[in-house]
Amino acid sequence: MPQYKVAIVGAGPAGYFAAQALQNLQSDELQFTIDVVERLPTPWGLVRSGVAPDHPKIKTVAKVFEKVATAGNFRLFGGIELGTDISIEQLKEMYDAVVIATGSALGKKLGIAGEDLPGSISAAEFVPWYNAHPDFADFNVDLSCSTAVVIGAGNVAMDVARMLALEPSELDSTDTADHAIAALKASSIREVVISARRGPEHAAFTSPELRELPKLEHTNVLMAKTDIESAIERAGSEIEKDTKSNLDAMLLISEKAATGHDRTMRFQFLSTPIEIKGVDKVEEVVFQKTGSDEKFSIKCGLVITAIGYEAASIPGVPYERGKVVNNEGRVSENLYVVGWAKRGPSGVIGTNKSDAADVMKLLVEDLKEAKNSGDISEILPANKFVSQANWEAINAAEIAAGEPLGKPRRKFVSREELHQIARN
Ligand code: NAP
């Protein structure tokens, strides 16, 4: 019976769904061993370091990942970086197929003056910081100002704004990084402006996320009713279903009377950022009313851009416009790509399931004779990587540490600490 070896690079949702698809494609005639190589000592990708901590339900998909990981023929090689510890060429040589599932880790830039001033950061930094990503343990977020501006009208902008505008004690029962809870408790920010360059009818928010905003217990959420009414008019009667449910949700928000809360999240539309001003740090953002010459500015000390992501490149893999160059997931001889690295940063976690399944079907079509030419465990010293058993020790330790505090888990942040727990 042919036994094929597949290496998946990246233990995020796309990587697990690719592994699951391969497991599902197995038959008496076709068997796989799957090795997943992950840069961090912890798996789960965006489910661990992207999903907002106040959205624990979304994270329950991790149960599916653990089922895949323990179904047999699956090995995790955590803490192993492609390009440093092992090269793509080595993987391609040893494995029958290699699947890139490394996502899109870099925040897109606005490309306007002042964007590099201190106090102007990307959601690609802020989100992993509050989610205890080891690379951002020492990231410095200055929350000493009273107003923050979040640029972008997607769900990431919404997550970022909500995290800044929530009453921070609401995060005590979540798996938010300890350092972020402490910083948010000390934060002076009381107004968060979410700024969209187009109208409400073009916003990329999804309606479940909009519908939860009026339920925030300690935050005013403000939208101008005239903005939403004009958008409804512009959208007309041929309106798409998703746009309609978004506008319905926004109308409800705009009709809710302002409350006396200390913290406010305010939406502005049709505002294009044209410059970030400040002497040594951010002091204001200048906007142009989209479609007109009218300018206005907002004084603030923090700007967070949440305008999409690009894939970080891997040596030996062709990239173009922030994505791996591919044809329906095929990159080159025995090399494939799935998830955001393949199609760009769009869709929810579940979108990766059908996407990965489609690519794995192509991978199976392309299989030749099984290579049997070794695997990564022959190159890496045994104590160099975090195995599935090591990760299970970390996972159990985090859950145990969170329990007395009423948290689903208390995340360990530093690589050293994570490796140490893995070894115990
Ligand atoms: P997104 O949904 O693509 O939204 C990006 C936003 O940035 C858009 O509003 C876009 O406006 C704006 N933008 C882009 N370039 C800009 C520029 N130069 N200046 C000003 N605005 C600009 O991306 P995302 O928010 O990063 O989310 C990525 C994916 O993850 C989405 O599919 C999202 O739904 C998903 N996600 C889901 C959840 C959830 O389910 N709870 C949470 C987080 C993320 P234009 O439309 O005008 O280009």
Image (cartoon, grey):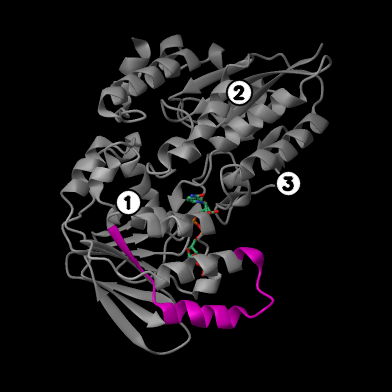
Q: Are marks 2 and 3 in contact (CB under 8 Å)?
A: no
Q: Which residue is mark 3?
A: 328
Label 3 is placed on what type of residue?
Answer: Glu
Circle 1 — which element?
helix
Q: Earlier in the sequence, mark 3 or mark 1?
A: 1
Label 1 crowd (10 A; few <14 / some 14-19 / many >=20): many
Label 3 crowd (10 A; few <14 / some 14-19 / many >=20): some
Ligand 1 neighbours mark 1 (CB distance < 8 Å):
no
Q: Which residue occupies the foreground of this view, 343 or 196? A: 196
* Disc nearest the viewer among 1 and 2: 1
Q: Earlier in the sequence, mark 2 or mark 3?
A: 2
Q: Which residue is mark 2?
A: 68
- Per the model, the C-alpha gap separating discs 3 and 1 is 36 Å
Q: Position of residue 142 (x, y in %)?
A: 20, 54
Q: Is residue 36 visible?
A: yes
Label 2 crowd (10 A; few <14 / some 14-19 / many >=20): some
Q: Which residue is mark 1?
A: 163
- Per the model, the C-alpha gap separating discs 1 and 2 is 31 Å
The quadrant of the image that shows the N terminus is top right
Label 1 is placed on what type of residue?
Answer: Met
Q: Which residue occupies the foreground of this view, 34 or 403? A: 403
Q: Are marks 3 and 1 in contact (CB under 8 Å)?
A: no
* Identity of the residue drawn at 53% across and 27% down: 63
Q: Is residue 240 magenta?
A: yes
User: Is residue 34 depicted above or below 269 in this figure?
Assistant: above
Residue range (magenta): 219-242
